[in-house]
Image (cartoon, rainbow, N blue to C red):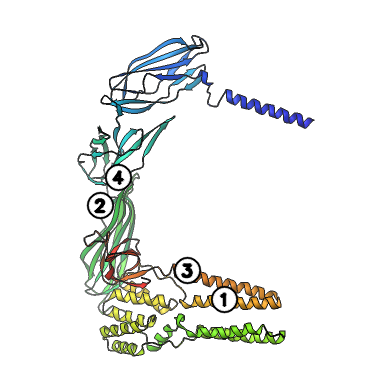
Amino acid sequence: MEGQRVRTAGRHLAGLVVLLAVLFPAGAQEPSADLPTVQVSAARIRRTERLTLDLSIPLDAPGEAVEVIPPPVPEILSLLVGPLVQPVKDPEGKPMLRYRYTFQGVRSGRRIWGPFQVRRGGKVYQTDPFLIEVSYRGDIDKVAYDVEWEAPERVLARQSVPVTLYIRHLDRIVLPDRVQIPELRGAFVEEVPVLAPVEEESMGAHTLYHVPVKTLMITPYESGTIRLPPATVILGGMEESGGALTVRVDPLPQSSSLHGVGRFEFYATRTVSAVQVGELFGVRLLVKGVGNFPFLSFPQPDPGDLAVLVREEEDEEYRASTEGYSGWRQRTYWFRAVEEGRLTVRIPPFRYVPPGQNGVRSAGGTSLAVEVREENVTPALTFLSLEEVRSLQGRWIVKDLRVLFLLIPMGLALLSLLVPWKRLGGYALAVCTVLWAGLLLWILLVPPDVPLPEQKLQEGLAFLAREDYGKAYEAFQEALAEADPAPGIHYDAAMAAYALGEHGRAVYHLRRACVQAPMAVILREALSRMEEEIGLQYQAALPAAFPPGIPWLGVMTGCTLSGLLFATYMRWRAPVLLISLLLSLSAAIAAGGYVFYRAVVLREPQAVVLTETPLQAVPEEEGRRLQICPAGTAVRTDYRYQDYVRVHTGMGTSGWVRRDALQWYIGR
């Protein structure tokens, strides 16, 4: 009974709390009968027409003290008379105060107005906001909009900032029919193809929209002021002008050398590590980030007395957005070595000013070493002999017919399970398993006698011995036409192509060889040295992988062992057989997963640029050039359009190159 009384009292207390919450809501509000209300004579008026607003305030008793705090009058109205305070009574005879205001429309527009604040009896009340509209030039069916610029109050000289033209106070999202902006002086101006997001102004039950119609990227030439001119926007038969805005332009910090304004990253690389006297080498300076890319300058590399500047090349890819110019610019300084010795190119720091921060930041500031020699710096060309080519050829297990021999001991092992005598069957199973393991080691460790076009290969090696690299390369090409995959022949062909100065073909053959024999260390080291010598050390290395046949051999071995162990476990029920079965299944699944990974990831089409070719923004002969791809550049390819192929470089740049400039070493 005591527990029942406690629960009943709790329910009564909860009901009292709910009743108090309904009668006296949070925020010191009173019931709706005591709230002040606003009534207007019309929600939309013509210009010069009058609008009457009545604020009715209920009173507890006549003569009660009341304070009214009206909101600011919107600029589309002008207060004529008011407030006129008059005591009145509501329909039930209760006392009220009525504040009457009289306004006149002064210009077309639409505003959310309110709320009025009323202080009475130590409490504060607020009215609901309401919408006021002044029609367009006497046409009661149209309401004009406002045209305004949105821009930072202060910018730096040579800082690229976006400014946006808005049409404001619309009751729905709509784009204009035409926008006219006079010429802006004192700054470089470029239109941004991407608009800023639509802004919303909500109050109470009303929402107005501020729609961007034009975004410009401006870069002031010098300090002072920039005046954004008044723009004209035509929409729905209405024409409105306005929005003139002045932006203050502050001077840049005093600095002996300043290269940019923005947020940047700076990189400096060399094209080669060693040259001979009279040869060219390059120093590449790369700037990435967001800032005033059209007006960037680069620090001047100093090679000392051992080299002279020959020419400069510049590549770029950046675009104007609502945050600024974002992308990258690259400048390559080409020097000619004039004297033997160890040359050190000193790169001054890249100095820039981050917007909104004080002071000048520095990035880079490094030195690059280049060895200059009198003798030929071409690395010693090491070629593979016939036996070495054969040893590399054996790593291509996918064509090894000895794999079929594994089926014989596995079949005998399964047949041994049918022997009725357990001891004899166990011995037979052990002998067959040992035989199968020996065959597997023989296949993995002993290179198979894979037929090679030895006549063509020996001809090529003979030409190499006589340093007739042109005929040697032709002989290797004929050998590859008869037998490919052949990583050893690709290696010798790469060395011959490098001796001929065909850097693109040399990189192609070495990358093709690494794909065919990815575990051969000599191939991977040769590719690394080759790309470093020709200035392509930044390229992504080929991932280390097993030869293509080994994962399939692992799948077959795991599945065969799993079947054998399952059969033996079902017969003898030994726990060690169950553990071995699980391990074998795990190995088969891992090998199968690697086969899938290699088929999906490692088979992505990849090619090499054979000759120096431009990377273009569009697949057209006269398209804008993004950069120059030197011979030997490795790229990933996407799809083809007429005579062009979409590619992605190791520097993260995408574009189009001519199909005849590529040769694929993975896929097609």
Picture quadrant where residue 381 is located: bottom left
- Few, some or many residues within 10 Å of mark 4 (<14, 14–19, 20+): many
Q: Which disc, if any, is residue 558?
A: 1
Q: Secondary structure at mark 1?
A: helix
Q: Which mark is residue 161?
A: 4
Q: Above or below — where is 489 with respect to 83?
A: below
Residue labelled with disc 3: 597
Q: Amino acid at mark 3?
A: Tyr
Q: CA distance from mark 4 to mark 2?
A: 12 Å
Residue 526 relative to residue 29: left or right: left
Above or below — where is 480 with respect to 147? below
Q: Is residue 49 left or right of residue 202?
A: left
Q: Is residue 616 visible?
A: yes
Element assignment for label 2: helix
Amino acid under label 2?
Pro
Q: Nearer the viewer, mark 3 or mark 4?
A: 3
Amino acid under label 1? Gly
Q: Position of residue 469 (x, y in %)?
A: 27, 84
Q: Marks 3/1: CA distance?
A: 18 Å
Q: Pick whichever, 505 or 398, lies toward us.
A: 398
Residue 360 screen position, x and y as percent: 32, 49
Q: State which tag comes first along the sequence, 1 or 4.
A: 4
